[in-house]
Image (tube, rainbow, N blue to C red):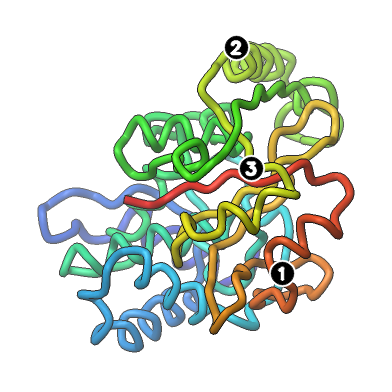
Amino acid sequence: MRKGSVLLFLWCLCGACNSRGQVPEPMYCTKEDRAVFDRYVQAMETKRTLPLGELITETALFFLGTPYVASTLEKEPEQLVVNLREMDCTTLVETCLALAHTLKSGKPSLEAYGRHLQRLRYRDGVIRDYTDRLHYFSDWIHENERKGLVRDMTRHIGGKPHRLTVSYLSAHPGSYPPLAASPQRIEVIRHQEEEISARTGYALIPGDSVEACADGMENGDIVCFVTRIDGLDLSHLGFIYRKGEILSFIHASSSAQKVIVEPRSLARYVKDIRTTAGVMIVRPE
């Protein structure tokens, strides 16, 4: 861990109390992350009153060009990771939602952002260990819909019932060091997978129906790409973005190695990725 990370982590863990007299939760972050946060607040201050979907879109556009880096959350011990310098598709989505809610609060601070982010990323907003993180995005949707933070719009805009079955983490523990080191955690994850797989109510917009359902999609909606890969639910995420007549999306692209506006339409992208069965559309609230 770089020196800046150590210094700011210790400040967040042991530093002065916040405005309500509470000690902030510990979190991994750097001085550079605080600088990005301050630039974001300054850049977005005049846009704070935009509808939430539009503010989320502007937030995602703010991060265009940010490097794509996977596995930035894999820290031990498990604590909240604040990384505004590099992102994958999931952390881009969580970052933009948490930043937009922080700005809407009227008193934006890095610590307030951390609280919003933790509430999104962890089951019940509580961090004890690796198993508290919402690893499957279908589970993320379920938990954050329960918290009133998002609404699954897929069925409402023309999606068909779809059953999700997950098992990938427990089947490949060697790929996840916190699981490989703890058989007990594997059992917790397996139990979570069973609960996720038993749920009903999910829907899917098939790839060949994306254009027909496009009118129901709004800027700032989370577009979730449902995969055919065995044991996984969703393989990629982004934000719906209309530019002129083209319905596309903003995402952290592994192929472009940065956050981009996808040059292809959403419908074309879905058709081009053979492992993608279709999409789910989730609206932040």
Q: Position of residue 129 (x, y in %)?
A: 54, 30
| Marker disc for residue 68 | 1
The residue where tag 2 is placed is: 198
Q: Position of residue 230 (x, y in %)?
A: 85, 28
Q: Report the mark closest to the observer, 3 or 2.
A: 3
Q: Report the mark closest to the observer, 3 or 1.
A: 3
**Considering only order in the chain, which callout, 2 or 3, is on the residue closer to the N terminus?**
2
- Left or right side of 23 for 8: right
**Distance from label 3 to label 2 (Cα)?**
20 Å
In this picture, is 211 found above or below 41? Answer: above
The residue where tag 3 is placed is: 205
In this picture, is 255 found above or below 114? Answer: below
**Distance from label 3 to label 1 (Cα)?**
27 Å
Q: Secondary structure at mark 3?
A: strand
Which residue appears at 65% of the width and 46% of the height? 279
The image quarter in which residue 52 lies: bottom left
Q: Secondary structure at mark 1?
A: loop
In this picture, is 108 found above or below 183? Answer: below
Structural crowding at the residue carrying mark 3, measured as other residues with C-alpha within 10 Å and reported as few (<14), some (14–19) or many (≥20): many
Q: Secondary structure at mark 2?
A: helix
> Which amino acid type corresponds to the residue marked 2 in the rendered image?
Ala
**Considering only order in the chain, which callout, 1 or 3, is on the residue closer to the N terminus?**
1
Question: Hey, which residue is sitting farthest front in the picture?
Answer: 212
Residue 193 in view here: yes
Q: Position of residue 18 (x, y in %)?
A: 18, 59
